[in-house]
Image (cartoon, rainbow, N blue to C red):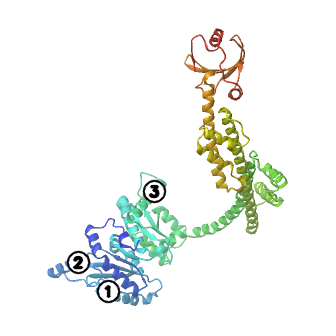
């Protein structure tokens, strides 16, 4: 729980009490500083609503219980309304039991004195942690309710925060399931009193003995889901930051676990603190303290058998570490390195052979000992699989692990070298593509050829054919040395190069489309549109311009307007022809339209660009 007053969560607290708290913040802060200066044993300070009937459970409620005289009663009620009720929690874990009374009385007297010095309206209740637990053992939960509605001033071990979230959650659970909840128990390191505690643990025991509508396992699963969900809600409501863990038991399972001497249940009975109990948990706890709860002989035998079984299981796990985990930890990266190199995914046997041939002999990037390490682990894998090896020692696993780490480090370095080589090759190819496309654009714009692509592009810029920014980007990309670039710089340059190539290509396409528009004829037939491209000696037909896969045909164009040698073509041949042949439209004769009807049918519409 936060110590900063402004960060305290004010949830499910009476409005009048909230206002009172805001009025006395400064008083509380002053009281806290005075108390902590004198008493390092104090682990929690909390402002709480007044208790209806002061009880002598602590040492410092201040005024003893008064007889019910009307005048005095009214005076007490007024004093209670105006009072500042503060609960002080003291850690007594290091105190000998025989000295506990003197220990807490001394602290209480000084706390009462400090309270009166700070403000005469302060009323304190001082309790040791063990006394707070005793109240729970005795079924006295009123103080817990007050703490859950209070405002935390100081909570070094977060015990008050734990009480608050547990109380909120307990209230949710009881309201939802009513009579089915027999015990709600706080446990774990925090309630045990450990110096360090990272979470809050509670256990809910549900009576399943009279449930008839569903099976016990179904009941357990349903209740568990709901109760754990309520735990998340309680965390949100209270704003408590510690992890809040909820365990749910049905009563019959809890009883069986006791008979089977389950250590978790015995620990819960020994250390648990009931925040709610309907006469189930405390009787068992007392019986355990009296030595009357003992495991049966059968349960003892089961616990002994568990030791042998777990030992066998541990050996099997060690075999699994070598037979599966280590083997695949070494095999898969080797396959990945070979695939990065450009080979198809290899089988395990091929992997060892290719690792040796490619990276040891050809590239000289890997030493033979690393290939032998993979061979050794593969032999282990096969021998375990065939039952030849039934046990492996921890020292042997340590040796294999050390070898695997060295092997993986080496493969990682190979990976980096191959990636760098690929990055360099890819960037060089993109730079060459940029130069080629610039020369293609210059040819389309009839610019006099230059060996230097930069000068050629500068002419295009000067003529107004290409934006100036493209020229600057081109110089930046082609002027970079891939050997001197980091991986991230290389990737950035490749992205820029691809983007510039796309811009150049779009410009080139637009120019070619304009150039070739005069030798294109559009034909509408049935519900389709075709395109006919005419050259002096050849004609191409795109049978359906809207089709995803283009059906392209070609024919020889005769002098009398007829067509000869009609056969299938493709987009590659058409593009090559467009680049290498003039786009002047030949003279069209009447016989040509008869040929079109033979191809597309009698009912056609022809339009010229």
Residue 92 drawn above or below residue 603 = below
Mark 3 — residue?
225
Give the answer, above or below, for where 300 lies relative to 456: below
* Occupied quadrant, residue 378: bottom right
Q: Which residue occupies the foreground of this view, 524 or 112?
A: 524
Image marks 2 and 3: residues in contact by CB distance under 8 Å: no
Crowd class of label 3 (few under 14; some 14 to 19; many from 20; radius 10 Å): few
State the image coordinates of residue 370 (x, y, percent, origin top left).
80, 59
**Viewer-side label of 3, 1:** 1
Q: Residue at x 65, y 65 (%)?
A: 310
Q: Residue 28: x percent and y percent? A: 32, 79
Image quarter for residue 44?
A: bottom left
The x, y position of residue 147, in whole percent, is: 35, 73
Q: Reading the chain from its start, which is encountered first: label 2 or label 3?
A: 2
Which mark lies nearer to you, 2 or 3? 2
Residue in front for this viewpoint, 447 or 156: 447
- Which of the two residues, 192 or 410, is positioned nearer the viewer here? 410
Residue 506 % position (x, y): 60, 36
Spatial distance from mark 3 to mark 1, Cα to Cα? 46 Å
Q: Visible in this render: residue 93?
A: yes
Rendered residue at 34%/72% (across/down) = 151
Image quarter where the C terminus lies is top right
The mark nearer the N terminus, 3 or 1, is 1
What residue is rendered at 45% in x and 60% in y?
A: 228
Q: Which residue is drawn at 67% across and 62% down?
A: 313
Residue, disc 2: 82
Disc 2/disc 3 C-alpha distance (Å): 44 Å
Q: Are marks 2 and 1 in contact (CB under 8 Å)?
A: no
Q: Which of 461 and 257 is in front in this view?
A: 461
Q: Pointer 1: what residue?
A: 112
């Amino acid at each position: 729980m936060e110590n900063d007053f402004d960060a305290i969560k004010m949830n499910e607290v009476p409005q009048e009490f909230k206002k009172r708290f805001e009025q006395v913040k400064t008083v509380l802060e002053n009281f806290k500083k005075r108390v902590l200066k004198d008493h390092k044993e104090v682990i929690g300070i909390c402002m709480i609503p007044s208790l209806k009937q002061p009880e002598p459970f602590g040492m410092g409620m201040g005024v003893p219980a008064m007889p019910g005289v009307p005048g005095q009663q009214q005076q007490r009620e007024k004093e209670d309304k105006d009072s500042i009720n503060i609960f002080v929690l003291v850690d007594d874990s290091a105190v000998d039991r025989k000295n506990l009374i003197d220990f807490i009385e001394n602290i209480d007297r000084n706390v009462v004195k400090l309270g009166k010095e700070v403000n005469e309206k302060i009323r304190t209740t001082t309790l040791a942690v063990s006394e707070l637990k005793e109240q729970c053992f005795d079924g006295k939960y009123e103080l817990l309710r007050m703490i859950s509605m209070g405002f935390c001033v100081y909570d070094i071990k977060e015990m008050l925060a734990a009480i608050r979230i547990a109380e909120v959650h307990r209230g949710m659970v009881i309201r939802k399931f009513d009579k089915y909840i027999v015990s709600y128990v706080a446990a774990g390191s925090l309630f045990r009193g450990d110096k360090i505690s990272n979470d809050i643990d509670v256990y809910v025991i549900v009576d399943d003995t009279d449930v008839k509508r569903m099976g016990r396992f179904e009941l357990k699963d349903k209740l568990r889901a709901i109760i754990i969900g309520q735990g998340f809600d309680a965390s949100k409501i209270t704003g408590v930051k510690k992890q809040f863990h909820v365990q749910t038991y049905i009563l019959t399972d809890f009883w069986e676990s006791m008979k089977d001497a389950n250590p978790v249940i015995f620990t819960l009975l020994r250390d648990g603190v009931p925040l709610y109990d309907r006469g189930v948990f405390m009787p068992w706890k007392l019986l355990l303290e009296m030595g009357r709860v003992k495991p049966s002989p059968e349960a003892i035998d089961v616990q002994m058998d568990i030791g042998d079984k777990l030992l066998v299981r541990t050996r099997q796990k060690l075999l699994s570490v070598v037979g599966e985990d280590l083997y695949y930890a070494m095999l898969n990266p080797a396959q990945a390195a070979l695939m990065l190199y450009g080979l198809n995914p290899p089988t395990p046997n091929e992997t060892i052979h290719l690792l040796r041939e490619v990276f040891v002999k050809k590239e000289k990037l890997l030493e033979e000992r690393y290939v032998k390490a993979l061979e050794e682990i593969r032999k282990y894998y096969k021998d375990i699989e065939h039952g030849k090896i039934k046990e492996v020692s921890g020292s042997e696993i340590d040796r294999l692990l050390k070898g695997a780490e060295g092997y993986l480090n080496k493969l990682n370095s190979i990976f980096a070298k191959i990636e760098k080589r690929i990055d360099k090759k890819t960037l060089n190819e993109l730079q060459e593509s940029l130069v080629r496309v610039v020369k293609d654009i210059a040819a389309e714009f009839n610019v006099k050829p230059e060996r230097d692509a930069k000068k050629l592009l500068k002419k295009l810029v000067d003529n107004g054919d290409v934006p100036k920014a493209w020229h600057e980007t081109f110089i930046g990309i082609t002027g970079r040395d891939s050997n001197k670039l980091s991986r991230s710089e290389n990737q950035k340059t490749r992205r820029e190069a691809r983007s510039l190539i796309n811009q150049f290509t779009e410009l080139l396409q637009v120019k070619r489309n304009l150039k070739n528009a005069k030798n294109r004829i559009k034909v509408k037939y049935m519900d389709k549109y075709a395109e006919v491209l005419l050259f002096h000696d050849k004609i191409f037909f795109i049978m359906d311009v809207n089709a995803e896969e283009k059906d392209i045909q070609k024919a020889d164009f005769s002098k009398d307007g007829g067509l000869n040698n009609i056969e299938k073509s493709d987009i590659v041949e058409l593009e090559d022809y467009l680049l290498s042949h003039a786009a002047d439209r030949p003279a069209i004769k009447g016989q040509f339209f008869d040929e079109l009807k033979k191809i597309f049918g009698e009912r056609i519409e022809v339009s010229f660009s």
